[in-house]
Image: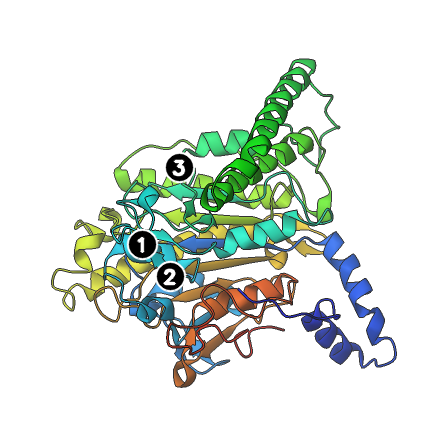
Amino acid sequence: MNYKKSNEANKWGRRAVIQALGVGAVAPFIPVLEADAQASAPLRVCFITSPNGISTEVIPTGSETDFQFQRVLAPLESHKSDITYLHGVDMKTYFDVATPNDHPPVVNQLLTAAASVNPNDGSNPAVSGSWLSSGISIDQFLAQRLMANNDTGTRFASIVAGVNTQQFAWKQVFRAPQEAIFPEVNTRNLHARIFDGVTPSNAEASVADPDLVRKLEQDQSVIDSVRAELDSVLDRVSSADKRKIEAHLESIREVERRLNFTNVNTSGTGGAECAIPAIQAEGGTPEDLYRGRGENMMDTIAHAFACNQTRVATLQWGNGASNETFPSIGVNEQHHGLTHDNFTANANKRALIGAWYGERLNYFVEKLKSIPEGDGTVFDNTLLVWTSEHSDFAQHSRVNIPYVLAGGLGGRIAKGRFFNYSNNKRAHNDVYVTIAQAMGFTDVETFGKARGNNGSAISEGPLPGLLV
């Protein structure tokens, strides 16, 4: 990663406000005004991944401002003005270094935009048999930057959730190079952790449970002793082991931050209505179970945003090579098989599955729009990013990676657009550069692997037109 040194805070915001107000002399004061705005409306982002690519019918037809949805995004027609699609974005990291065209070696590049670490080349015996990423994932990068600032720190650095995510080809989220985070797949466990000690907006502030306070003090004591012990060995280990210990210390610090936020009344933060969502029963057919678990995860994330428990989340549907079936839409074959067997003939079934996931995104959008915040809703200050580890142009294609954006992130991302970068193919790294800058980190000029092994640029900066 490369960061630009700049004295301008929130450059994109300055430009937008200056243009809107027609001001000149007061321009230096715009960052202060903008900081106040951010304090009242936290910015949030959730990265959503679905497996086995997304049908080409996710790509709109038409021009940038005059476009039509095909079947995959048809469920979102009523929210069309809030949806932006990015076309012509390739996974250039995949082509930079010869990587097996399979799920485990590639899923780890989706959110990290970094090269894969080969478990069989002998360079790192600790990762034998498991493909990993050489970089941090965009969600964790944003979470760490937010947590480094007292004004944007939250009880949880991020939520990493999964729906029927199994051990095969699941590694998408990395807190550091080669350090993957397995998603929480039990919705009740996630719900219990996120909302423990949270006071809803319409409730009186709670009084701390003495037993809970005593337990937290004990936990803190254990953390202090472990941290001291780890600190004592840092100077006596190799540089590689030192990095691992430091990463573990950072995970301990995350626990400390969560303990410090316990029993904090988060109601009213940013003007959002903080409520603890109910967990719906999960059962029925395997497809019903898949849908229900996903809806519970989305409800939990949406209200965690509203209660300012976190500002960053990922939601991973299944995993690479997912074998889910969808009988309710007439697809009884396993999804993964449809991306290989009779590829052309099965295009219609892949489009039906894509629309199924499009309906899930619609559910998430409507959930966020149902939670009031200030004069609008939580959705107004949130960005949902739906993508997949490959496209549907061919089996395991790494060109034209699908990116569906829902929401404008408080007016910082262009909405209701169809951006086609086909004439100047861009790397998926730059999707994340754009999002990082929209989140206020305008020093981020590249993300992931910035240059290829031949010296050519992979990450080139924010995508044209997307920042407002």
Outermost residue to the top: 211
- Residue 330 in view (yes/no): no
* SS at mark 1 in the image: loop
Type of amino acid at the residue the image marks with label 3: Val
Query: Which residue matches tag 3?
Result: 185
Looking at the figure, which quarter contains the C terminus? bottom right
**Corner quadrant of residue 262:** top right
Query: Which residue matches tag 1?
Result: 51
Q: Which of the two labelled residues, at mark 2 and mark 3, occupies the earlier sequence position?
A: 2
Q: Tell me the distance, in whole angstroms, between the alpha carbons under discs 2 and 3.
A: 27 Å
Q: Which of the two labelled residues, at mark 1 and mark 3, occupies the earlier sequence position?
A: 1
* SS at mark 2 in the image: loop
Type of amino acid at the residue the image marks with label 2: Ala
Q: Position of residue 312 (x, y in %)?
A: 56, 50
Picture residue at 57% right of the left edge, 72% below the top: 414
**Contact, mark 1 vs mark 3 (Cβ under 8 Å):** no
* SS at mark 3 in the image: loop
Picture residue at 37% right of the left edge, 42% below the top: 163
Q: Which of the two labelled residues, at mark 1 and mark 2, occupies the earlier sequence position?
A: 1
- Residue 202 vertical position relative to residue 420 in the rendered view, above or below: above
The residue closer to the viewer here, 275 or 36, is 36
Query: Which residue matches tag 2?
Result: 115
Q: Position of residue 21 (x, y in %)?
A: 80, 77
Type of amino acid at the residue the image marks with label 1: Pro
